[in-house]
Amino acid sequence: MSLTALSFPLTTLAKYGGLDTTIYNYEEALKRPLEVKKLAFSFNNSNHPYTKALPDGRIQALVNLEELFIDGYGGKYIKLPDELSKLKKLKRLTIYGENLVQIPNVVWSLQSLTDLTLEINSLKEEDLKLSSLPQLGDFGVKIHKTEKLPGGIFENSKLKRLFIQSDDAKVIPDQFNKLPDLTSLTLHCQNLIVIPGSIGSLKRLAIFDIYNKTVKSLDIDCGQLDSLRDFRWGHSLNFPNSLTAAKNLHRLNLDVSFFETINTDTLPFKNLEILDLSFSKLKTIPPYFSTLHSLKSIYLTNNNFASIEFDFSQLTNLTELSFGDCENFQKIDMNKFITSLKTITKLERLKTPSLSKEQSIIKDGYHYNFDWWEQRY
């Protein structure tokens, strides 16, 4: 399961597909039961009428089925056949139903499931029985009308990847210490009041993705997050100063943020390769950015810089630098800006409001001397 988004590309229509092809025609799948590994039912796509019905008991004939996908179900309750439990190779189950108020009981009998993704209208404590799925490693849930998420989310200690999306959720139980094997955590909960502090206990966490525009600070002890490589906080109100304790970051993404300055004296990220502050409100580039010698890519698109008094010459590993669509860029001292870039021999792509698409791509093996600037002005 991809935990970056709750989506599934319904683009392949295969009436006679191979083992790894998603089949959308249930009746055709039943004619070739031993060959079908992936089966999809879509209530949204009018081009495939045979998919607009739920599977029945005949599905047990698909003994090699590994993935079952149900999209766009509009009812409050969904009836799935008990025969699903006989599919011993079923690893991935996805059910999207924005009006659902209950998870079918048969789901909790699928002992071979490794990946479960759900969209549901509301979620109660008794609805989740994740502990009954011994092989489950990935769990993703999109919840519409639940302010307090149930503690049942934490009842399977073997989870490795967890994705939670909810615009209504305000509270998540502070029980992440129950998930010691978690390596990827996505919290796309824009109205969440507090980011649970127990996340700081996740020593194996490598990817941490937040989307939230309510929380003012990241009150987590990041000093124990030795495995954290990739951190994102979309719509952050302030720079999360506690993050400076996570010193092994490779990627830092604070896109669409609301802060104008970064109120910290240093960024001790010796391994940071990608820094993304696009679509934010930065006024200046902090001088200590020059200490991030491992940086390969900097994305500062769509900011409103008052000035860029910054020397890029120390960032010798830089291959990509983007100031695309930044306001007031014409006020920048371009002589200083260009001079600070000339020593960066690895630079392959530079994007500013003054560059054309062709000029933004630096050809391999070609030393870019910035003559375009002198010619234009």
Image (cartoon, rainbow, N blue to C red):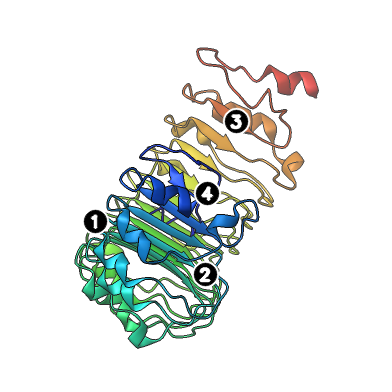
Which one is earlier in the sequence, the residue at label 1 or at label 2?
2
Q: CA distance from mark 1 to mark 4?
A: 35 Å
State the residue position of label 4.
9
| Amino acid type, callout 1 | Asp
The picture places residue 164, in percent across and down from the top left corner, at: 43, 69
Q: Badge 2 is on which residue?
A: 212
Q: In which quadrant of the rendered image does the N terminus lie?
A: bottom left
Mark 2, residues whose alpha carbon is within 10 Å: few (<14), some, or many (≥20)? many
Q: Residue furthest top?
A: 365
- Name the element at disc 2: loop
The reply to whether dot 1 and dot 4 touch (C-beta < 8 Å) is no
Q: Residue at x 41, y 75 (%)?
A: 195
The CA distance from mark 1 to mark 2 is 23 Å
Check disc 3 and report the residue beneath it: 350
Secondary structure of residue under mark 1: loop
Counting residues from the N terminus, which is met first, the one under dot 2 or under dot 4? 4
Picture residue at 43% right of the left edge, 79% below the top: 194
Report the residue that reaches farthest toward the front. 31
- Residue pointed to by mark 1: 226
For the point 51% across and 41% down, the residue is 298
